[in-house]
Amino acid sequence: MPQRDISLVIPVYNEQDSIKPLIAELGEVLNGLDKSYEIIFVDDGSRDRSFALLKEAAAHDPRIRAIRFRKNAGQTAAFDAGFRTAQGDIVVTMDADLQNDPRDIPRLLEKIERFDVVCGWRHKRRDPWIKIVSSQIANAVRNTLSQEEIADTGCSLKAFRRESLHDMKLFNGMHRFLPTLAKMEGFTVTQVKVNHRPRRFGRTKYNIRNRMVRAFADLLAVRWMKKRHLTYEIKETIR
Ligand code: UDP
Ligand code: MG
């Protein structure tokens, strides 16, 4: 696989109706950029026609790649598998359900000229109110306890210089903390406001219970990691 300018990494879990329109929207944006790209779909154990559709799309376009998990392993695992195979200098992540808008990608790419990580911020979120409120609380708690200032870490639309992902050891649930993990390694992080759209097809994979409780446990782990992170400067070495 030759080197690319951009790799898109897109986790897919039972999103059969979104795949075709998503590929069409991505093509419109990416073909106008004058950059080489690949789109890596990671099928996280879908039980619908998602993988069959990805296979069909890949047969028509060599820039489309697909990985299929044997069974559902979670969104972080899907990102991890995509990151490990990505060839692009810049890695762009997003959701498969059409809630993120591919037309924001050029703005992320513009910003990544000056930063290592660019996070999307869904400032007008189009989700059920209960999800918006719980996510606002989660972000506030997360930012306070991990001394962060990321408005919306749950937004998958992000861009990374590939180096910022190299040494990241990911654990289940850690996709919400990618900017914090990158910062710990000395990379720079910024955020840009992005569009957000209601889910048109399929269903959300998260509810308050599975998100809040687990994300809180993950937050404590990240807090611990930050505290115990090794920071030393070598003054001299002999031989
Ligand atoms: N997803 C996944 N594995 C999972 C859960 C979700 O690959 O176990 C994918 C899902 O298909 C979507 C993205 O991650 O592309 C975000 O999920 P979802 O839209 O359900 O989250 P929400 O937008 O409701 O927070
Ligand atoms: Mg969604």
Image (cartoon, rainbow, N blue to C red):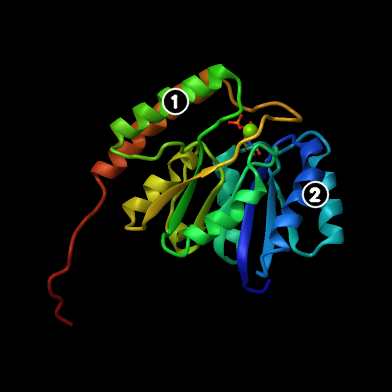
Question: Where residue 69 sits: x, y (%)?
Answer: 69, 45
* Marking on residue 54: 2
Instruction: Quarter of the image for the C terminus: give it.
Output: bottom left
**Left or right of 226, for residue 156:** right
Res 193 visible: yes
Dot 2, crowdedness within 10 Å: few (<14), some or many (≥20)?
Answer: many
Secondary structure type for disc 2: helix
The answer to which of marks 2 and 1 sits earlier in the sequence is 2
Q: Nearer the viewer, residue 40 or 158?
A: 158
Q: Nearer the viewer, residue 172 or 127?
A: 127
* Marking on residue 136: 1
Question: Where residue 237 sits: x, y (%)?
Answer: 15, 76
Q: Nearer the viewer, residue 133 or 40?
A: 133
**Left or right of 72, for residue 123:** left
Amino acid type at circle 2 is Leu
Question: Where residue 165 sits: x, y (%)?
Answer: 47, 57
**Left or right of 232, for residue 85:** right
Secondary structure type for disc 1: helix
Q: Quadrant of residue 77?
A: top right
Q: Residue at the spot x=69%, y=30% of the render?
A: 199
Q: Residue at the spot x=52%, y=61% of the render?
A: 110
Question: Where residue 126 sits: x, y (%)?
Answer: 61, 28
Q: Residue at the spot x=52%, y=54% of the render?
A: 159
Quadrant containing ligand 1:
top right
Amino acid type at circle 1 is Gln
Label 2 or label 1, whichever lies nearer to me, is 1
**Left or right of 206, for residue 162:** left
Q: CA distance from mark 2 to mark 1?
A: 34 Å
Q: Quadrant of residue 100?
A: top right
Res 83 visible: no
* Marking on residue 209: none
